[in-house]
Image: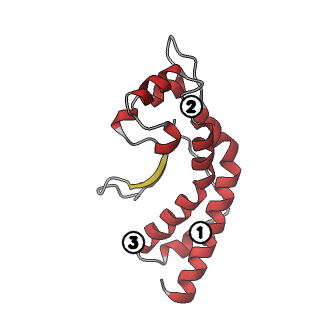
Amino acid sequence: MSEEFEVKGLAELDAKLDGLAADMQWKILKNAGMNAMKPVLDEMKNQAPRASSIPAVARREKRGIKPLHEVTKRWSEAGDKGESDGIGYINVGYRSKKHWWVRLLEEGTEKIAPIGWMRRAMDNNVNTVLQRFTNQLQKRIAKFEKTGK
């Protein structure tokens, strides 16, 4: 479920980022990405399947596995250390090995119709995410230029 976006018109922003130390670039981009993905996180929590409507969720909750809306998280990861492009990721979803079955609910199986709440959360918020990301980058770079932090 990987989506790629090409944003044009950010040559000036790219030049400003190139002028920063690598660790500061990562810090600014990570902060902006985490901030931008907040609406997706909130919608995923609100739309996550509940035990009252999905029997598979109810069975797992009876066995002591936390409800999906309580374990929805966002986290950042750096790319492989050896990569020259220095790609980083902001993830929103479920990290626990106990929640391996969430993908089956999202995408469906032969016996389960797909629910698709994670994809809908991203689709519904893509413009908001891009706007928040851009705004946060501008704020963070302006702050860095002003204070050096």
Q: Nearer the viewer, mark 3 or mark 2?
A: 2
The kind of residue on which mark 3 rests is: Asp
Q: Position of residue 96 (x, y in %)?
A: 37, 40
Q: In the drawing, what numbered circle is on residue 23?
A: 3
Cβ–Cβ below 8 Å for labels 1 and 3? no
Q: Residue furthest bottom?
A: 147
Query: How far apart, in angstroms, are the residues tagged by discs 1 and 2?
Result: 36 Å
Number of other residues with Cα within 10 Å of mark 1, as a class: few under 14, some 14 to 19, many 20 or more: many
Query: How far apart, in angstroms, are the residues tagged by discs 1 and 3?
Result: 15 Å
Q: Is residue 87 above or below residue 138?
A: above
Nearer the N terminus, badge 1 or badge 3?
3
Q: In the drawing, what numbered circle is on residue 38?
A: none
The kind of residue on which mark 2 rests is: Arg
Q: Is residue 58 above or below residue 138?
A: above
Figure quadrant of residue 48:
top right
Depth order, front residue of 87/129: 129
Nearer the N terminus, badge 3 or badge 2?
3
Q: In the drawing, what numbered circle is on residue 50?
A: 2
Cβ–Cβ below 8 Å for labels 3 and 2? no
* Residue carrying label 1: 137
Q: Residue at x 42, y 27 (%)?
A: 62
Figure quadrant of residue 95:
top left
Nearer the N terminus, badge 1 or badge 2?
2
